[in-house]
């Protein structure tokens, strides 16, 4: 039986490679996969129309919603509240008004979160939304042999109370169960010491709450060096720490590839060795690139919202679109609401 | 094949419709040898139609003010497929006035291998040959983006419209590498054209999802479409179809091809964006649709009104000025660009290693 038609609202103007890469990804998505998935491209109608005219796409699955302006990447996030009809806000509004089932943007993350706060509500029981990013690890998990761990919050807000860190753990657990199919996701709490009594008071407080919660498979405090090992399916931290951490992981991957490239240029025998390893290195590169996992869901809201990396190319954005579709089909907000009120 | 009654044949003609078959009327895969074999062995009842094609054909075959339409098919399929394809027409209730198939076996036996794959010489000759047998009436052509239909139909339209002379035609045929004997027959037909014909529209079904802008060099006569609901809407805008004709095509696509409100509304918006339709067309359609049309056409109750409202809500708010096209098409340049693109695709090699 065909699944119900769903619509993904896409901010066509958000991100460093917008609108061309965003439109290219949507054009490509419109030609494959689930025929009951439709796309609303939100932004400058003239620009989007012209681009689509020159691009192979399926117009049966795309429509354009005009937005007068957009928030630049370097603009203060608060701009979105003072300016009418920005693309990111119109995208959120389409979802809030029931014309779309999920919103996706690679634009100014602060503006996106503020727009979400304006148009969406928190699910019952949630105190704050959290941005959840995945990162690659050496270990596989769940029936899909997924190599990614989940880290949240990575920047929806800066600080978090102990109760909010507990919320993040519940949301992360629900997400890992629903989207990744892991029965009992292992949860770690990021701190600067493995000792439960050391660290910021919010983290120490959260330790107790997590320890006592029957729905959470809590593994205790973890330090930064545990993150890349992949022993935990869900890692919980406040937004400021998470944002720094995820960018560190991304940068470390880039640096490793850069080292390999510079070695390649130095000596002939290194070059030969690396040449032999090239297909393996390509696989590693694919595994650690943010383009492969595309976007980070903003959990705890009553709607599906995905923030794609601001540097998203069409490939990264295609993966973010897939994630948005998957989250809508999994009815993620309802599932998280269920987890929060159990 | 069932013959039309003598009375019907004697009626005046209001329009001539010329169709391609594969990927325009039938969903056919011939991208690999396996696909070709599968297509050749398919029974008539297993052949699938392009969504809405049969419904649209039924509407264009309706008599208008005691005038009939003429319907011809020119296909690149081999003549050996005739009986299967005629049976398929019969199953669909379609009776063409002419049905031309390609003499592929003859071409192979004569060693004319370029003619086996090439379409320009074959289709242009067939179009001109059957044009001589049809009365004067405006024409509309249907093809797809898999081969060179848009190019061939444009040359044909300019020829019968008197916009191409014999020297220009010869240059085009030489550039398209058409065999000398075929070229001579085409030139003879072109020389014998007595009256000026007129091609209103050339619909190109974007089966391969080519960018619509790809066809701009051939002029605004070409209308790229992604389904036959779009063609029905263009006929409505041209006042060839009524709202009821459009509704019947939509109803068939809902019943047989799982089309719904989203696909129709987006198809509508696409034509508005490309300025093939105007907001006045939307308003006129909105005034004409209603529950009576739903019932008469077999649409779900309230569907037409819901669709009109959604289309109005999605109507473009900020459009670029209309695209300017300076004709006539430069056919030699188009052929050259097409050849260069094919060569570039063949030469393009993907890098395999991390350091390559």
Image: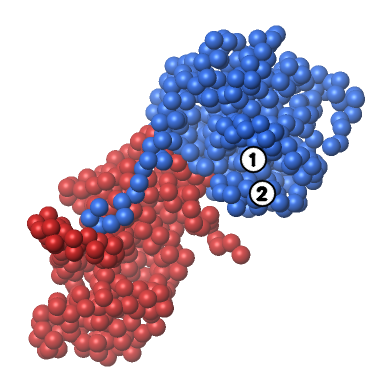
Chain colours: A red, B blue
Residue B276's tag is none
Where in the figure is residue A138, as x and y percent of width and height?
A: 26, 75
- Tag 1 or tag 2, which sits nearer the N-term? 1
Where in the figure is residue B195, as x and y percent of width and height?
A: 69, 9
Q: How many marks?
A: 2
Where in the figure is residue B99, as x and y percent of width and height?
A: 75, 32
Above-or-below relation of A210 to B330: below
**Residue found at x 55% / y 46%:** B31
In the displayed structure image, the side of residue B299 where residue A303 appears, left or right: left
Q: Could you tell me which secondary element the residue under label 2 belongs to?
A: helix
Circle 1 marks a residue in which chain?
Answer: B
The quarter in which the N terminus of chain B is drawn is: top right
Q: Nearer the viewer, residue A106 or B221?
A: B221
Q: Let me know if marks 2 and 1 both belong to one chain.
A: yes
Residue that carries the numbered disc 2 in the rendered image: B39
**Residue found at x 48% / y 29%:** B215
In the displayed structure image, the side of residue B249 where residue A93 appears, left or right: left
Q: Let me know if residue B22 appears in the view.
A: yes
Mark 2 or mark 1, whichever is nearer to me: 2
The reply to whether the C-beta atoms of the residues labelled 2 and 1 are less than 8 Å apart is yes
Q: Residues within 10 Å of mark 1 (few under 14, many from 20)?
A: many
**Residue found at x 40% / y 24%:** B321
Q: Nearer the viewer, residue B144 or A340?
A: B144
Q: Nearer the viewer, residue B124 or A288?
A: B124
- Residue A135 sits in which quadrant? bottom left
In the displayed structure image, the side of residue A333 where residue A205 appears, left or right: left
Residue that carries the numbered disc 1 in the rendered image: B22
Above-or-below relation of A110 to A339: above
Q: Could you tell me which secondary element the residue under label 1 belongs to?
A: loop
Circle 2 marks a residue in which chain?
Answer: B
Q: Residues within 10 Å of mark 2 (few under 14, many from 20)?
A: some
């Amino acid at each position: 039986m065909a699944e119900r038609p769903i619509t993904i609202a896409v901010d066509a103007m958000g991100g460093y490679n917008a609108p061309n890469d965003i439109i290219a990804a949507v054009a490509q998505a419109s030609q494959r996969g689930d025929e009951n998935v439709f796309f609303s491209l939100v932004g400058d109608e003239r620009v989007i129309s012209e681009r689509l005219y020159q691009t192979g796409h399926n117009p049966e699955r795309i429509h354009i919603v005009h937005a007068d302006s957009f928030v630049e990447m370097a603009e203060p996030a608060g701009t979105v509240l003072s300016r009418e009809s920005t693309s990111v806000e119109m995208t959120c509004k389409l979802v809030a008004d029931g014309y779309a089932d999920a919103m996706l943007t690679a634009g100014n993350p602060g503006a996106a979160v503020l727009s979400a706060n304006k148009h969406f509500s928190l699910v019952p029981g949630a105190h704050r939304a959290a941005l959840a990013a995945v990162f690659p690890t050496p270990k596989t998990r769940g029936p899909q042999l997924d190599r990614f761990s989940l880290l949240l919050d990575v920047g929806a807000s800066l600080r978090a109370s102990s109760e909010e860190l507990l919320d993040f753990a519940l949301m992360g657990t629900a997400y890992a169960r629903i989207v990744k199919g892991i029965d009992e996701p292992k949860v770690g709490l990021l701190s600067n010491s493995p000792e439960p009594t050391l660290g910021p008071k919010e983290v120490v407080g959260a330790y107790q709450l997590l320890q006592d919660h029957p729905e959470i498979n809590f593994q205790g405090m973890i330090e930064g060096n545990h993150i890349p090992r992949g022993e935990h399916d869900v890692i919980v931290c406040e937004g400021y720490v998470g944002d720094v951490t995820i960018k560190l992981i991304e940068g470390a991957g880039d640096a490793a590839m850069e080292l390999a490239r510079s070695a390649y240029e130095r000596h002939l025998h290194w070059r030969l060795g690396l040449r032999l390893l090239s297909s393996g290195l390509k696989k590693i590169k694919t595994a650690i690139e943010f383009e492969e996992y595309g976007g980070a869901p903003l959990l705890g809201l009553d709607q599906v919202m995905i923030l794609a990396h601001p540097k998203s190319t069409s490939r990264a954005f295609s993966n973010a679109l897939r994630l948005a579709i998957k989250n809508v089909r999994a009815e993620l907000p309802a599932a998280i609401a269920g987890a929060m009120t159990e | 094949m069932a013959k039309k009654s003598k009375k019907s044949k004697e009626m005046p003609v209001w329009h001539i419709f010329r169709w391609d078959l594969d990927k325009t009327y039938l969903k056919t895969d011939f991208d690999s040898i396996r696909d070709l074999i599968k297509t050749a062995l398919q029974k008539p009842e297993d052949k699938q139609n392009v969504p809405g094609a049969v419904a649209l054909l039924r509407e264009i075959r309706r008599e208008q003010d005691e005038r009939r339409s003429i319907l011809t098919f020119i296909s690149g399929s081999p003549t050996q497929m005739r009986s299967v394809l005629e049976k398929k027409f019969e199953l669909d209730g379609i009776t063409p006035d002419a049905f031309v198939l390609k003499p592929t076996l003859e071409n192979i036996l004569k060693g004319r291998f370029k003619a086996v794959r090439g379409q320009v010489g074959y289709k242009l000759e067939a179009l001109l040959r059957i044009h001589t047998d049809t009365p004067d009436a405006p024409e509309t052509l249907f093809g797809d983006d898999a081969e060179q239909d848009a190019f061939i139909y444009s040359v044909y339209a300019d020829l019968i419209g008197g916009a191409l002379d014999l020297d220009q035609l010869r240059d085009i045929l030489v550039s398209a590498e058409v065999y000398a004997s075929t070229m001579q027959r085409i030139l003879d037909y072109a020389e014998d054209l007595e009256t000026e014909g007129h091609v209103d529209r050339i619909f190109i079904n974007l089966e391969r999802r080519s960018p619509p802008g790809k066809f701009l060099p051939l002029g605004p006569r070409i209308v790229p479409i992604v389904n036959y609901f779009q063609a029905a809407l263009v006929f409505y805008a041209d006042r060839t179809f009524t709202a009821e004709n459009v509704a019947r095509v939509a109803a068939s696509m809902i019943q047989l091809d799982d089309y719904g409100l989203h696909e129709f509304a987006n198809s509508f918006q696409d034509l508005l964006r490309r300025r093939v339709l105007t907001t006045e067309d939307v308003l006129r359609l909105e005034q004409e649709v209603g529950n009576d049309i739903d019932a008469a056409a077999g649409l779900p109750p309230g569907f037409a009104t819901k669709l009109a409202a959604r289309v109005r809500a999605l109507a473009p708010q900020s459009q670029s000025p209309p695209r300017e096209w300076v004709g006539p098409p430069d056919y030699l340049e188009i052929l050259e660009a097409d050849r260069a693109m094919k060569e570039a695709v063949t030469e393009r090699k993907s890098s395999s290693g991390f350091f390559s």
